[in-house]
Image (cartoon, grey):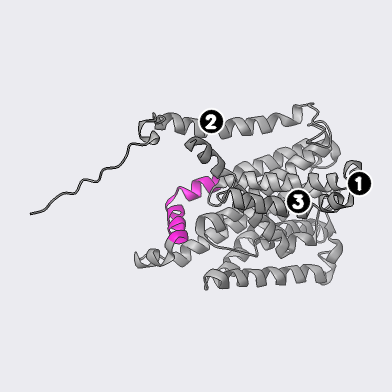
Amino acid sequence: MIRTAVVERAVTVDDIRPRPDPARRRMVRRAVPVAVFALLAILPFSTLDLPALLPGVVNSPGSLQLLAICLVFAGLAATYDLLFGHTGLLSFGHALYIALGSYTVNIAVTKFGLSLPAALLLAVLVGLVVPTLLGAVALRVNGIAFSMVTLAMAQVGSIVVMSDPGRLTGGEEGLSLTPSALPGFLSGVANTANLYWLALGYLILVLAVIGWAVNSEPGRVWQAIRENELRVSVLGLPSYHFRLLSFVVASFLAMLGGVVHLFLVGGSSPQITTSNFTLAFLVMVVLGGTGSRWGATLGGVLYTYLDHRLAALGTSDAVASLPAVLRAPLSEPLFVLGVLFIVMVYFMPGGLTSLAARLRRK
């Protein structure tokens, strides 16, 4: 005789709380990003003065430059989260593909005299072939071994750039982009707003591609690989090919970000080839929340904004007038960012995106 056990439990507040309509929740989820991007798109028309937050009025070249860099790094952080947060691949060589886009276009137009469309086409080709070849090698191993292989590849790329082979990369001084290489609407301080919209377009493209990819069949396999790759292999799915697809998509989007970064700063710096540059994206993703493209975006914007504004704050008269015990740490942006990172990880291990869930539970 089979007896059925009935498990009784106490009724909680969550059981009697009215649940939101799923259709309404979907509409809100779609409407909020559209409203945010619409607001970002009209910022170059605003003359609002926010002296405590921006170096000038909103539509001044300095403020738009800062906002554009924040948008580009937000997109780059989202591409890193596609690897780390969605597929579980801890890469220490993501900066290599950002530098690949920047240096490929820069060398093509500055050293070889190619037109900008031809240079962009070359960058697309290189941005597909190189990640496929390097990813095919690196993904032969898993875990920390994969991280070490990607780190080694990035270090080789950094050494090549620093050594200035054939006087192509400029070595430690970097390589300035020829101003005449850019079309008129993207060159000059007067056209900073166009560069800002270019950075915003890049962020929207990255988020759209990642959103589509993670909700597709490969995206669901990526999540399964992140949770348990052995189980995916037992089910007969080729986990290696799916991991390689994630690697190529993330690296290609990062390469496009390198091109936009080149247009924004007007040159290629060897700093974007270092492993420290990749570690910054890891910090951005953890700050925002791993496995969430919106979390990575928030983390990228917050980290980049603080990195630039804290540097200006550290050299200000207000900090210079403080006692030495406060002046020394506040004049180092990386120290302040490090403290912020420790506090965030300790109090909000799920990142900024976990804050909304906590507020809903209260």
The location of residue 212, given as percent across then percent down, is 50, 46
The location of residue 144, given as percent across then percent down, is 57, 70
In this view, the residue in front, 134 or 40, is 40
Is the magenta region chiefly helix, strand or loop?
helix
The answer to the question of whether label 1 and label 3 lie on touching residues, with beta carbons closer than 8 A, is no
Q: Which type of secondary structure does the marked residue at label 2 adopt?
A: helix
Q: Nearer the viewer, mark 2 or mark 1?
A: 1
Which mark sits nearer the N-terminus, 3 or 2?
Answer: 2
The residue identified by callout 2 is 31
The location of residue 180, given as percent across then percent down, is 85, 48
The residue identified by callout 1 is 320
In this view, the residue in front, 212 or 336, is 336
Residue 336 - label: 3
Residue range in magenta is 208-227
Q: CA distance from mark 2 to mark 1?
A: 45 Å
- Bin the neighbour count of mark 1 within 10 Å (Cα to Cα): few under 14, some 14-19, many 20 and up: some
| Up-down relation of residue 281 to residue 62 (above or below) | below
